[in-house]
Image (cartoon, rainbow, N blue to C red):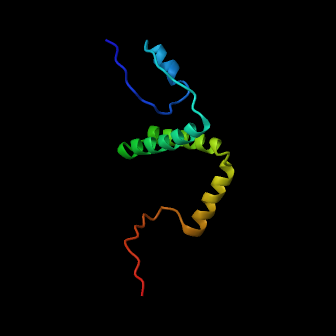
Amino acid sequence: MKKEIPYNKLVRDLIPEIIKKDGKRCKVHTATEEEYEKKLLLKLHEETQEFTDEPCEEELADILEVIDGIIKYYNFSFKKINMIKSKKSASRGSFDKRIVLEKVLEE
């Protein structure tokens, strides 16, 4: 009896070949521009959730891989992103002091 497992998600480029090497078959298609954008953002959520569930370097590397894909898709500049990050860190700080804002009191 054949078993079908639906995924309908963005996967790394070599996954279909890995599946075939395992003696299995798979059905794939190339995402349209609109679909690719949606799938990239869903993949970011998926990988972030996996990291939240099990914080480790491998899961963090997966997040970075998706971020690389997002940078390429939107034609962003990694250099500019790092510059913005540095400016925000200088003007607003980073997260090193572990500060939790509980509330703001207005008079």
Q: Quadrant of residue 105?
A: bottom left
Is residue 97 placed above or below 81 in the rendered structure?
A: below
Is residue 96 placed above or below 10 in the rendered structure?
A: below
Q: Considering the image in quadrants, where does the C terminus appear?
A: bottom left
**Residue at left 37%, top 24%?**
5
Please give left or right for residue 78 compared with residue 98 in the image.
right
The percent coordinates of residue 85 (x first, y second) are 60, 58
Residue at the bottom extreme, as displayed:
107
Q: Quadrant of residue 92?
A: bottom right
Residue nearest the observer in this picture, 106 or 30? 30
The percent coordinates of residue 58 (x first, y second) are 46, 37
Please give left or right for residue 84 compared with residue 9 in the image.
right
The percent coordinates of residue 55 (x first, y second) are 39, 44
Q: Considering the image in quadrants, where does the N terminus appear?
A: top left
Residue nearest the observer in this picture, 96 or 74? 74
**Residue at left 64%, top 59%?**
84
**Residue at left 45%, top 65%?**
97
Is residue 89 placed above or below 53 in the rendered structure?
A: below
Counting every numbered tag in the picture gives 0
The percent coordinates of residue 96 (x first, y second) are 48, 61
Please give left or right for residue 25 compared with residue 35 in the image.
left
Please give left or right for residue 37 compared with residue 26 in the image.
right
Residue nearest the observer in this picture, 86 or 52? 52
Q: Quadrant of residue 88?
A: bottom right
Residue at the left extreme, as displayed:
1
